[in-house]
Image (tube, grey):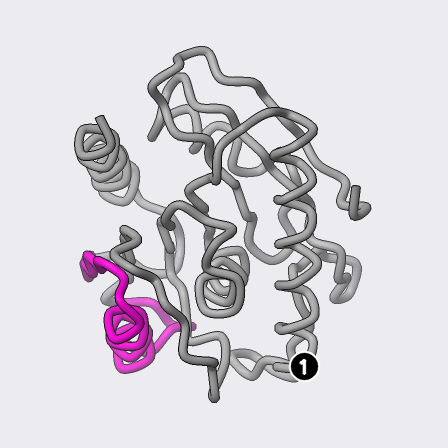
């Protein structure tokens, strides 16, 4: 298996979709386990640690400055992560997961949707930005995506998150974009919206 340090927790409910948990800068494989359990109790949880270090803090890809990504690295790391997920699915016997990404983790999840859409069943993107300035024409074929942005987010401009929503919609995703009265951090409103959204995705799948 592509060598990501990771945590895996098996499903406790057969009907719940597996989640791929992708932490923000400075997080690790333990960071979003609690969030995963809150938004989808019973789901299998697959949580890798980003393999890039920025001043000792794990990330999923390199950046050149705040909000300026090393896009060559974004592409390479997204392919590595896609390989990890494919191998983990075989090892743990899980279906294609729904990505739940925060900040840097949301950005690599968005890159996965654009570069390797077959890897994910959908995505919850918390405070995501457009990961690639010249993305390939992805075919998302109705994949469900929940994009949650913060109105007072000092890192992600409103125009950028709106552009990401449009980009994913144009590629065929079913995008639900909500702008919350919040900053960059995850709020209780994010948790509630994500839980309700996963419930609606499960109901449609059933």
Image coords of residue 97 (percent x, y): 47, 39
Against 117, is 37 above or below? Answer: above
Residue 70 relative to residue 181: left or right: right
**Which image quadrant is residue 48 in?**
top right
Q: Residues within 10 Å of mark 1 (few under 14, many from 20)?
A: few
* Left or right side of 169 for 115: right
In the image, farthest residue toward the top:
12
Residue at disc 1, secondary structure: helix
Badge 1 is on which residue? 72
Where residue 12 sits in the image (x, y, percent)?
46, 11
Q: Residue at x 37, y 19 (%)?
A: 41
| Magenta-highlighted residues | 152-180
Residue found farthest to the bottom? 134
Residue at 39% over, 12% down: 13
Q: Please indicate whether residue 198 sits to the left or right of residue 25 in the image.
A: left
- Which residue corresponds to the image point at 42% horizontal and 42% vertical from the top-left? 98
State the image coordinates of residue 171 (x, y, percent, origin top left): 31, 72
Residue at 31% over, 76% down? 167
């Amino acid at each position: 298996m592509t060598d990501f340090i990771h945590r895996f927790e098996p499903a406790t409910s057969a009907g719940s979709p597996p989640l791929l948990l992708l932490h923000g800068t400075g997080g690790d494989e333990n960071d979003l386990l609690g969030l995963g359990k809150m938004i989808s109790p019973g789901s299998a949880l697959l949580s890798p640690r980003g393999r890039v270090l920025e001043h000792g803090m794990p990330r999923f890809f390199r950046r050149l400055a705040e909000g300026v990504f090393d896009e060559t690295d974004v592409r390479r790391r997204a392919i590595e992560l896609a390989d990890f997920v494919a191998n983990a699915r075989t090892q743990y016997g899980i279906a294609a997961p729904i990505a739940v990404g925060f900040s840097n983790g949301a950005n690599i999840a968005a890159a996965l949707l654009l570069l390797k859409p077959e890897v994910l069943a959908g995505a919850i993107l918390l405070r995501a930005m457009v990961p690639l300035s010249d993305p390939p024409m992805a075919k998302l074929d109705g994949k469900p995506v929940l994009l949650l942005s913060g109105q007072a987010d000092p890192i992600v401009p409103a125009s950028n998150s709106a552009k990401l929503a449009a980009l994913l919609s144009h590629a065929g995703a079913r995008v639900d974009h909500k702008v919350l009265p919040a900053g960059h951090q995850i709020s209780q409103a994010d948790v509630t919206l994500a839980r309700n959204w996963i419930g609606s995705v499960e109901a449609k799948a059933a």
